[in-house]
Amino acid sequence: MNDTRTLPVALFDSGVGGLTVLKALQQTLPGEELLYLGDTARLPYGTKGRDTIVRYTLLAARLLVSRGAKMLVVACNTATSAALQTLQEALYPLPVVGVVEPGAQAAATASRNGEIVVIATEATISGGAYQQAIMRICPEARVRGRACTLFVPMAEEGLMQGPLAEGLAHHYLDDIFSPAVTAPRPDTLLLGCTHFPLLQDALQKVVGASVRIVDSAATTAVCVAEQLARMGLLRQDTTQGRCHFMTTDNKERFVRTGSLFLGSPLHNADVELVDL
Ligand code: DGL
């Protein structure tokens, strides 16, 4: 009989952004086997309508489930915002974890004055999931959302630092963070898109050193670890877990940009081209 505990934890994102969550999972749960899908053929999700995002998300999730998984991590804020509940219902009893609640928790813990800015895709911001999740944890917080659509292709292009990244950050954020803006000043910037952590240095320069920048990767990994432990699903083997990567388009590009997101080289042989 198959032991469910040996199955991989499956993750997916529209592209390589979810690799920031995979990296945090590897650090928190080094023994787990991981199965990652980047739906690069349909990227970006963040400018699409809700119904389309839900449809794409279900396709990606079903592919991962067909490979065998003991948990699904929606390593994409846009997909989590639009489709977490749908996925949880469709895949029940498989546990499905999203990145929005853990991200909201990270921001609520980091903020001292309750002035929080969330940057994310257009779909995530207009859906309001982050704003609501933070307010549930911290009702006195003031949460402002800002869609930063162009950060996604910029990060996918590997342009994480320098004048272009900083210029775009000024374009999106100066009216909130520039020193000329009078109080109340936000003390926390939440990166509500898994593509954004790689832009952290450029963002920090623009918003100022006093602003805490947080994302959902580490808190999601803790959440996954707790849930696996609670369900008795942690892998018992003490050897390092392996990772298998899948992409729906252009394997070479996934290898190139994925390596940047992982901070270690990916190889062609590690990545499988799939169709949904
Ligand atoms: N990485 C996705 C997220 O976390 C968004 C990228 C996209 O627009 O597809 O929201």
Image (tube, rainbow, N blue to C red):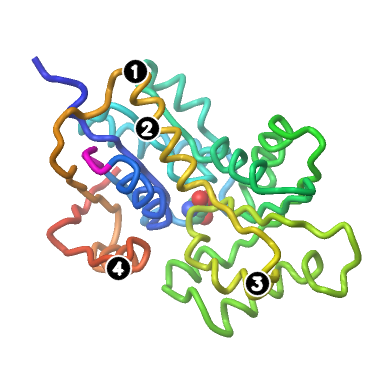
Query: Residue under circle 2?
Result: 225
Decide if residue 151 is on the left or right side of residue 2.
Answer: right
- Residue 231's mark? 1
In 3D space, how far apart are the residues under numbered discs 3 and 2 (Cα atoms)?
A: 33 Å
Please, is residue 267 above or below residue 188 in the view?
below
In 3D space, how far apart are the residues under numbered discs 1 and 2 (Cα atoms)?
A: 10 Å
Of circles 2 and 4, the one toward us is: 2
- Position of residue 2 measured from the top left corner of the image (x, y, whole percent): 11, 19
Q: Residue furthest bottom?
A: 163
- Position of residue 263 measured from the top left corner of the image (x, y, whole percent): 32, 65
Quarter of the image holding residue 202?
bottom right
What amino acid is labelled 2 in the image?
Ala
Which stretch is magenta?
Answer: 30-34
First of labels 4, 3 by sequence position: 3
Of circles 3 and 2, the one toward us is: 2
Which structural element holds mark 2?
helix
Quarter of the image holding residue 92?
top left
